Image: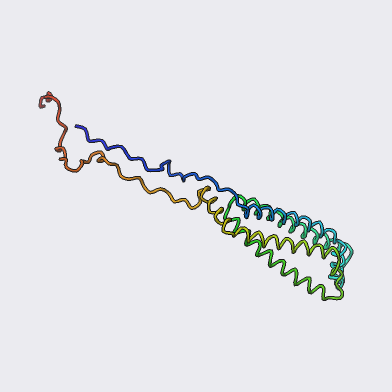
Amino acid sequence: MTAPQPGPYPQYPGGGGGMPPVQPKPPIPDTVRNAFYLMLGAAALQVVGIIGSLAQISDIRRAVRDALRDQPDTTENTINAAVNFTIAIIVIIGLLFAGLWVWMAFANRAGKNWARITGTVFFGILSLLTLFSLISAAGSASNENSMTAGTTSSAVSWVINIIIWIAGLVTVILLWNSRSSAYFQGAAASYGYGYQPEPPYPPPSGPAPGQTAPGQTAPPAGPPPSDGPQDMPPPR
């Protein structure tokens, strides 16, 4: 007598190894597309700002010379080293900001919500740096010995910085628009973010091996009955 076999396991709706359902990515709204172009434009302006800063090498040299004027051991080599270091810092920071603009542009266009949050944080840092630069420029302009205040190159750099800040402000507003938020939520669903695993499969409909179904009696204990008599070995 063989034990009853369990019935077939029912298929779980939408089964497929617990994989999240594939959803199409929503189309990019105009708000996100315009923010993408603004961020690329800000990156290009950042590169222009680097070129404008390099055009102020003579002003940088005057500022370094004035700062080291009271040092007794200042030499021309010391001034050149300080000028080169300042230029290197300007170029590195400018390229870093340009790279961040490009990175945030493509990540936000792809619908990455973390990129929208990170870009907002970067804009906050940019605002603090711009405010600090404005305060420093105001202090330099009030100093009659300043050699860089009021120069054309400095004015161009300030115009570029202000345009970049405005582009960042408009970008943040566009990214947190209601249409943009709906796009980021839809993109997150298409990527499978926030997916909850499927609940366990329901129990089988039939009894498990070795068990009896309700309303049936268990088979008697002992060896299973045979189909006919068997010859027993003679006792020793």
54 or 108: nearer the viewer: 108
* Res. 27 visible in picture: yes
Residue 73 visible in the snapshot: no
User: In the rendering, at what x and y percent does residue 199 appear?
Assistant: 38, 49
Give the image location of residue 87, x and y in percent.
Answer: 80, 59
Work out whether residue 73 or residue 233 is closer to the camera in this orientation and state it: 73
Q: Quadrant of the C terminus?
A: top left
Left or right, 21 with reference to 33: left
Q: Residue drawn at (64%, 52%), measured in percent from left and top?
A: 33
Q: Is residue 145 above or below residue 186?
A: below
Q: Residue at x 78, y 63 (%)?
A: 159
Residue 223, given in percent of the width and then of the height, sits at 16, 33
State whether residue 199 is above or below residue 166: above
Which image quadrant is residue 146 in?
bottom right
Q: Is residue 9 left or right of residue 181?
A: left
Q: Quadrant of the N terminus?
A: top left
Q: How is the image coloured?
A: rainbow
In this view, 192 is above or below 153: above
Q: Viewed as shown, does residue 26 lie left or right of 127?
A: left
Q: Residue at x 85, y 59 (%)?
A: 55
Q: Where is residue 153, by image quadrant?
A: bottom right
> How many numbered marks appear?
0
Q: Which one is in front, 91 or 183?
A: 183
Q: Extreme right residue here?
A: 76
Q: Nearer the viewer, residue 46 or 41?
A: 41
Looking at this rendering, what residue extends furthest in the left direction? 235
